[in-house]
Image: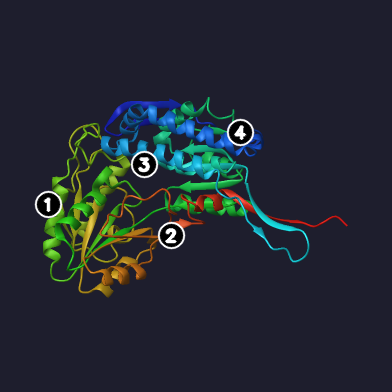
Amino acid sequence: MIQSRSPQNPADVVVEVPAAGASEVARTVEAARIAQREWAVNAAARSAALTAAAERVAAAADELAGLVVREVGKPHTEARGEVARGVAILRYYAQQVFDPVGSVHEPSGAGLLFTRRRPLGVAGLITPWNFPFAIPLWKAAPALAFGNAVVLKPAPEATACALRLHELFADLLPYGLFSVVPGDATEGEALIGAADVVSFTGSVVVGRSVAAKAVARGVPVQAEMGGQNAAIVLPDADLDHAAAQIAAAAMGYAGQKCTATKRVIVVGAAADDVRDALVAAVEELTFGDPADPRTAVGPVISLAARDRVLAAADSAERAGGRVLTGGRAGDGDGWYVPPTVVENLPDDHELVCDEVFGPICAVQRVDDVDAAVAFANGVRFGLVSAVYTRDLNAALDVSARLDTGLVKVNSPTTGVDFYLPFGGEKASSYGPREQGKAAQDFYTSTHTITVAPSA
């Protein structure tokens, strides 16, 4: 049985449904494969259906935002933004349906030579709980736009959001074309074993397993995993601007984003000023009930997540570090942890090396820019980094040397543009980029066609 509870009120069971089971996943994929055959041949129908889906989501925006707040504890303002982003994604891919699907080339002899992209079949999507509408849609919308069917296996903690999305689309899409299979590891493995293309977002451990299983079957796979993201503050940076942005990027939605800032690397003699400004900015963030529009930091997703953040803060102190703010359990029945900032950690501490998915970040001091770049690159992850400076030359130099898929200058590590490729380096990602124009490459294959004149 799959049960999803509200993290701000664990007594509130948002949904409880049977797990699909491996055999039901197999049946769902076969139904999707049948539906996909006709779906792939009519571009105008695909565009119209995605446009209608966008309008359906837009009309239900208030309800959907409320469900996001209730099921995953996302603050109200961010929840509304996520739903709006889902609408924009659907509208964007409704138009991408009409993008070129190939090109014509000069043949080596008489005749016609051209390429054409064709859908792969059934896309198996395995998605996390932290963006319960945006991530399923930024995977499903391009898959559908380019002629595939979709079977979605959401994280158990986001089951209600996924099922509601299915209800909204049920009469807009052919039967079987977009399906949701509630479940956990059993259902995920069954989907990997049956789909024609697999897209995953989640932890490194699970992502590596997903990639290995898909590769063993010979099907395309992308896996977006963790991030241990650094914000580098150079001596000439606008202090208040940098502190406010880093505080929001580290602690917003309780730090539960793969793009959240986890390390603040301060260069030079102004380190104390940056630290103090950051702590002040963090303490100004409204912490509490995610349904309150003023709240920036709500609960973490589970008791285990709360315990891990508290254990990391305790470990930091035992390792000689200092907790500057937070580091204790929040009040009330929900899974709350106040925003936590630590400093003076050894280089091998968990908070320096590994992603702790919660409202906690570490401040680290270095002497110069070269040391900052080396420190930022010195982890196994490479998703996103930020650089704060007024010096254009320094911004370009540091950006060119950072081993991350995304680099933001005077901008927070959080927040991505859905119309551009998204993905990281090293342990953060496996396979092709997703979103934007890159999605067409992933969800289709290129066929080269030669037409020679009849003898």
Q: Are marks 1 and 4 in contact (CB under 8 Å)?
A: no
Viewer-nearest of labels 1 and 4? 1
Residue, x 32% and y 39% (percent of image)? 81
Mark 4 Cα shell of 10 Å, populated few (<14), some (14-19), many (≥20):
few
- Choose the circle earlier in sequence order: 2 or 3: 3
Residue, x 33% and y 32% (percent of image)? 65
- The amino acid type found where label 2 is placed reads Ala
- Choose the circle earlier in sequence order: 1 or 2: 1
- The amino acid type found where label 1 is placed reads Ala
Q: Is residue 193 left or right of residue 282?
A: right
In whole angstroms, how far apart are the C-alphas of marks 4 and 3?
28 Å
Figure check: 403 above or below 306: below
| Residue, disc 1 | 280
* SS type, badge 4: helix
In whole angstroms, how far apart are the C-alphas of marks 2 and 4?
32 Å
Q: Which mark is residue 427?
A: 2
* SS type, badge 3: loop
- Residue 47 lies, in percent from the top left, at 53, 37
Mark 2 Cα shell of 10 Å, populated few (<14), some (14-19), many (≥20):
many
| Residue, disc 4 | 23
Residue 227: name its quadrant. bottom left
The quarter of the picture where the C terminus appears is bottom right
